[in-house]
Amino acid sequence: MLLRKMFTALRGKATETGEAIVDSQGIRIMEQELRDAKAAMNQANEELTTIMARRNLAAKEVDTLSDKMAEYEKSAMAALEKGEQSLAEEVAGEIARLEGEREVAQANVTQYDGTIDALKSSIAKSKGEIRRVEQQMSHVKATEAAQKAQAAVASQHAGQNASMNSAVASLERIKERQALQAEKLKIGESMQAQDSGADLEARLAQAGIGKQQTSGSDVLARLKAKQNAGN
């Protein structure tokens, strides 16, 4: 049971592969089939020419036999007029033999005519089918070319989208890395300030304790006081 299922699966896979090959090479296969059809039609034309030639030869044979029979009939009539009964009978026998040959030749002509008509009809039908396929093939080729172009554009657009998405992702990673680096530098500066005591002085100054930084207003007040003292 298992082996049969495996064999069936393999056959299915082979069929799918074969169909995929046929689909991908559809136009090439169709072109080859069209060439084969044209070759077959050319062969049929050659056969038609041969049969028509044989038919003409058979028709000429019928005419030749008819001419001989007409001559022998004249000879037989002349023999009868002269009382040559035996000779007339001999000539009549020859006429009968020629009639048999002519019947065979005429039957050949009739048979050739039937074959010729059938071949002409078949060739005409084949020519019509070939013209129809050639016209449709032009349409199929144009359609496939257009579809390939559309697929290429779609693929390129998809590639552009993928590239853009990748670029955006790269930009976000860079921004994240820069933000992380900036935060690390900020923490490093804070730790360095703590080690040097600058951080403590800054916090004391902020609380109004310790040495205060002289402002512009303080300097101006001091100058005014000095001026008043001089007066």
Image (tube, rainbow, N blue to C red):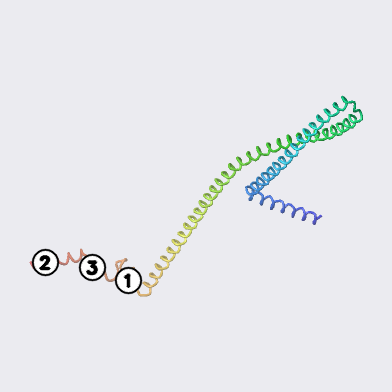
Q: Residues within 10 Å of mark 3 (few under 14, many from 20)?
A: few
Query: In the image, which disc is placed on residue 201?
Result: 1
Q: At which x and y percent is residue 212? A: 26, 69
Residue drawn at 71 percent across, 40 percent down: 49
Find residue 189 and report its image quarter: bottom left
Q: Which of 29 and 73 is in front in this view?
A: 73
For numbered disc 3, what is the local secondary structure?
A: loop
Report the side of 132 relative to 146 (left or right): right
Exactly how many numbered labels are in the figure?
A: 3
Query: In the image, which disc is placed on residue 42?
Result: none
Which amino acid type is shown beneath numbered disc 1? Glu
Extreme-front residue of the structure: 82
Which residue in the structure is indicated by mark 2?
Answer: 227
Whichever of labels 1 and 2 marks the residue nearer the N terminus, that label is: 1
Please say if 99 is above or below 156.
above
Determine the CA span between mark 1 and mark 2. Answer: 34 Å
Report the side of 200 relative to 59 (left or right): left
Which residue in the structure is indicated by mark 3?
Answer: 214
Evaluate if marks 3 and 2 touch, with contact meaning CB atoms under 8 Å apart: no
Residue drawn at 47 percent across, 58 percent down: 167
Please say if 209 is above or below 158.
below
Q: Nearer the viewer, residue 29 or 220?
A: 29
Q: How crowded is mark 1: few (under 14 residues within 10 Å), some or many (20 or more)?
A: some
Determine the CA span between mark 3 and mark 1. Answer: 15 Å
Whichever of labels 3 and 2 marks the residue nearer the N terminus, that label is: 3
Please say if 230 is above or below 89.
below
